[in-house]
Amino acid sequence: MTGNKMAATKEALYKAHVKNLREVSNALRNLLRALNASLSSGETQTSSALLKTCILLLGAWSENRLNKLLYEPNGFSSAERDQLTSCRTQIGTWKSAIEIGFRKRYKIPNAPLDTALQLTPRSYYQALTAALDNELNPIIEMRNKLAHGQWVQPLNNKNTDFSQDMRLKINNENAHTIKCKFRMLEIMAQMIHDLVTGNGAFERDIDKHFQKFENAKRDIMGRNYVEWVTSMQAKYKRGKIKRNSAPSIS
């Protein structure tokens, strides 16, 4: 006979999510380096495959980071965690996590946060919610399409027609935008972590975090991608010529 196995403890699950997140973070950083190398050497097909895999991993990173957030020490109660895991979508879970965090921190159990919060925390609440909609949700949507193998021509949610909007979103991503968006999601996750764990870091650091978030967002538009790739390819060619012309050691 096989005995009933006990469910994993909250502490064990938290440790598992920490390990998963660390592994995905390392994989994404390694793939971004490999993507830059393939761009430098002009390997177009490899670059395309690596870019789409980076988008997939960035979406996986956000899901792992959310799972870790749900089990943070001094974070959500079991009842709150049950409420969060009942959300139908990942973006809905993130938004609910923010809402619970603000309600607990500012002692607003039921009233609408857009009117009940004072001006400064309300601006933080609205800015974090907007960041989820504008920055995280497109990553989740692209990840879902790519995970279903829709790498060239994504379909609509019912799989009955092509999604030109999603195709444009995926085609507009590149090595630089993904690197910047990874920074943005890391910063955003840290702000939400500070919010829900009840420490003093939220009010102390949020303006500094938002500044870094906005800097990363501006960096996306601040670099000419074609010129950046051209400069990497020129550097690669110079290095190759230098290596080929170096005298051999007998």
Image (cartoon, rainbow, N blue to C red):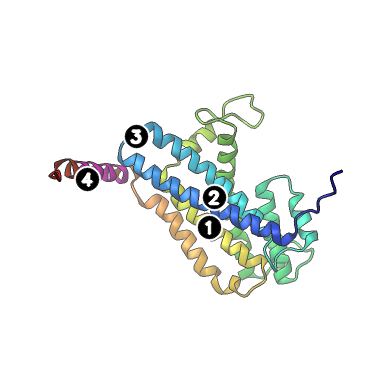
Residue 233 horizontal side relative to residue 102, left or right: left
- Residue carrying label 3: 43
Image disc number at residue 15: none
Q: Label 1 sits on what residue type?
A: Glu
Q: Earlier in the sequence, mark 1 or mark 3?
A: 3
Residue 74 horizontal side relative to residue 190, left or right: right
- Check if mark 2's residue and mark 4's residue have beta carbons within 8 Å: no
Label 4 vs label 3: CA separation? 16 Å
Q: Camera-side residue: 211 or 51?
A: 51
Is-magenta flag for residue 231? yes
Q: Earlier in the sequence, mark 2 or mark 4?
A: 2
Disc 4 secondary structure class: helix
The residue under the point 48% across, 48% down is: 28
Q: Residues within 10 Å of mark 4 (few under 14, many from 20)?
A: few
Disc 3 secondary structure class: loop
- Residue carrying label 4: 239
Q: Quadrant of residue 119?
A: bottom right
- Residue carrying label 1: 186
Label 3 vs label 2: CA separation? 24 Å
Q: Which residues are magenta?
A: 228-240
Disc 1 secondary structure class: helix
